[in-house]
Structures are given as structure tokens and as C-alpha cells.
Amino acid sequence: MARDEKWKGSNRAHVLTFEYFKQIHMDDLETILYKKGKLNTLKYWNPAAPGSSEENEMRAFDAAAMLIRFAFVRSIKFEDGMTKETAMAEFYKIMKDGDKEIFSLAEAVDKYYLFNNEEGFQ
């Protein structure tokens, strides 16, 4: 199975997003990178609950907050003008829509945090 070409190992936001799902939620490599996965294929999502259920919305909220903490403990800084509140709102909006691609979240991470050989990721 070919890897989704949008994922770049040299893009630090992509790496952070991949590591977040792998380390925090124990998602596997194939699900994240190879299946052009939708967010509803990841372990934070409850596939037995209706897509827009309160349970999945709460799971998305928790997962978005954990992503903010995951970046924080790695001392990753926000882009100028971005805050944890704006990032949280964007990440939650994406993560509660299980039909969105995992890559959509990686792109939002890239937008909110300093990456691409910028200060921040160690």
C-alpha cells in the first residue's frame, strides 16, 4: 500500500501530529499514514457512536486539549498572533468532524505552531 504523499517526514508539524497519535492514542502507522485515514479511524473516536454524537464531540475536545499539551511539553511555540485558545478551537473543530482527513489536522498544527526549520521543535 502506498503512503499518502501529502505526509512529509521533513515537515515538523506532520511529524508532531503523527507522534501525537502514535504515542498518546497508540494509533498504528498504517492507519495514520497509509490509509488516507479519516479522523474517525483513529482510536480517540468511538465508531459505535453516531458521528456527531455528544460522546464523539467530547472525545474530540479531550483529544484537542491533549494535542495542545503534547506540543506544550515539547516547548513548541505558537506562531505570532496564535494562542492556545485559537489553536484549541481550530483543532476541536477539525477533530469533531470524523470525516475530515488526519492530514487536515496536521495542516492546522503547521498553521498554529512554529515549524519548518523555525524555532521550537527539538
Image: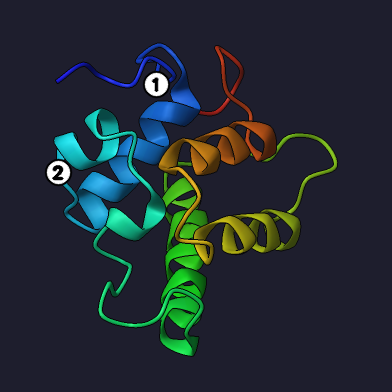
Q: Can residue 80 be seen here?
A: yes
Distance of label 2 from label 1 (alpha carbons): 15 Å
Q: Residues within 10 Å of mark 1 (few under 14, many from 20)?
A: some
Identified at 47% across, 55% down, the residue is: 99
Q: Which amino acid, by three-letter code, is at mark 2?
A: Asp
Residue 37 versus residue 2 in the image, above or below: below
The location of residue 62, given as percent across then percent down, is 45, 73
Q: Residues within 10 Å of mark 2 (few under 14, many from 20)?
A: some
- Compared with 55, 72 (above or below) is above
User: Which of the pair 92/79 is nearer the observer?
Assistant: 92
Q: Which mark is residue 7?
A: 1
Q: Quadrant of residue 42?
A: bottom left
First of labels 2, 1 by sequence position: 1
Q: Is residue 122 visible?
A: no
87 up-or-down from 57: above or below:
above
Q: Callout 1, which amino acid?
A: Trp
Give the labeled residue for mark 2. 28
Mark 1 residue element? loop
Q: Is the image coloured rainbow, by chain, by secondary structure, or in one colour?
A: rainbow
Residue 55 in the image, given as x and y percentages of width and height: 41, 86
